[in-house]
Image (cartoon, rainbow, N blue to C red):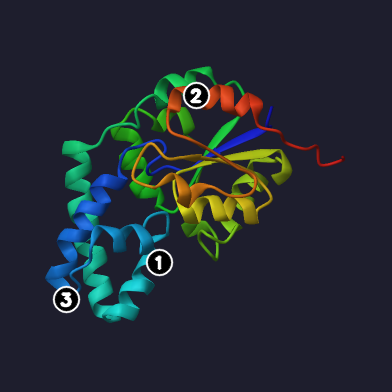
Amino acid sequence: MPALVIFDCDGVLVDSERIALRLNVEIGPELGWAITPDEVMHHFVGRSSASIRAVISERLDAAAAARWDERFIERHRAAVDSDLEAVAGIHEALSRITVPTCVASSGSHEKMRHTLGRTGLYEHFEGRIFSATEVRDGKPAPDLFLHAAARMGVDPSRCVVVEDSRYGVQAARAAGMQALGYCGGLTPREWLEGPDTRVFDDMSDLPALLAATPVTSPTS
């Protein structure tokens, strides 16, 4: 069994990626970029706010990126309050996982307090939540996952990451961790497939997958 399971937040614990995609497609034309759902998936999903602002700044300019971010934060909060649900099966899966867990997300702590709180998951992870705002480079760089492992006192080789984005599984591989890629949301299966990664589409399968995922001892 792994010594630590690191969960992404959006799309793995909370079903928020659909909300984010809809809002970005709505906001884009208001600021001069008629962004498509496919473009949101390719450029935004799984990345930090800073990385997304950089993409928008390159396409438009820094001022437009700042306005985009402001509108997204405001509308996202309202949409979470009215529409957000936990990912199907995650509560039951967490109840069956006996090894230590934590969250490492591209989102801010404020955002995670809101989304995890609305879905009854915040208390499960309280004190073990890490944000890309704490590291220099967000996903697909390994910094966030390495930071989470260090804070939890676990060697990276003993960690398994549960992710739903292409950038997330890339970050896990770069950190030297096994990845379980969840394709039950928006991300196509083929975007998650690759070395050291098993892809699944039903959260009820997660505990068994963790038990069957090989990890190595740091002394081996």
Q: CA distance from mark 1 to mark 2?
A: 33 Å
Say what amino acid the circle numbered 1 marks: Ala
Q: Residue at x 64, y 49 (%)?
A: 195
Q: Nearer the viewer, mark 3 or mark 1?
A: 3
Say what amino acid the circle numbered 3 marks: Gly
Residue 120 image offset from top left, x and y in percent: 34, 27
Mark 3 surroundings: few (<14), some (14-19) or many (≥20) residues within 10 A:
few
Task: Tell me if residue 211 can be seen.
Answer: yes
Q: Which mark is residue 32?
A: 3
| Sequence-first disc among 1 and 2 | 1
Of 216 and 9, the residue lying toward us? 216
Q: Mark 1 touching mark 2, by CB under 8 A?
A: no
Residue 215 image offset from top left, x and y in percent: 72, 36
Q: Which mark is residue 170?
A: none
Q: Indicate whether 209 appears above or below 18.
A: above
Q: Residue at x 54, y 37 (%)?
A: 102
Q: Indicate whether 166 appears above or below 122.
A: below
Q: Secondary structure at mark 3?
A: loop
Residue that protrudes farthest toward the front in the picture: 190
Of 165 and 199, the residue lying toward us? 199
Residue that label 2 marks: 205
Q: Residue at x 21, y 70 (%)?
A: 67
| Sequence-first disc among 2 and 3 | 3
Say what amino acid the circle numbered 2 marks: Asp
Residue that label 1 marks: 50
Residue that protrudes farthest toward the left in the picture: 30
Q: Indicate whether 59 appears above or below 14.
A: below
In the rendered structure, the answer to whether residue 192 lies left or right of residue 219 reads left
Q: Residue at x 26, y 80 (%)?
A: 60
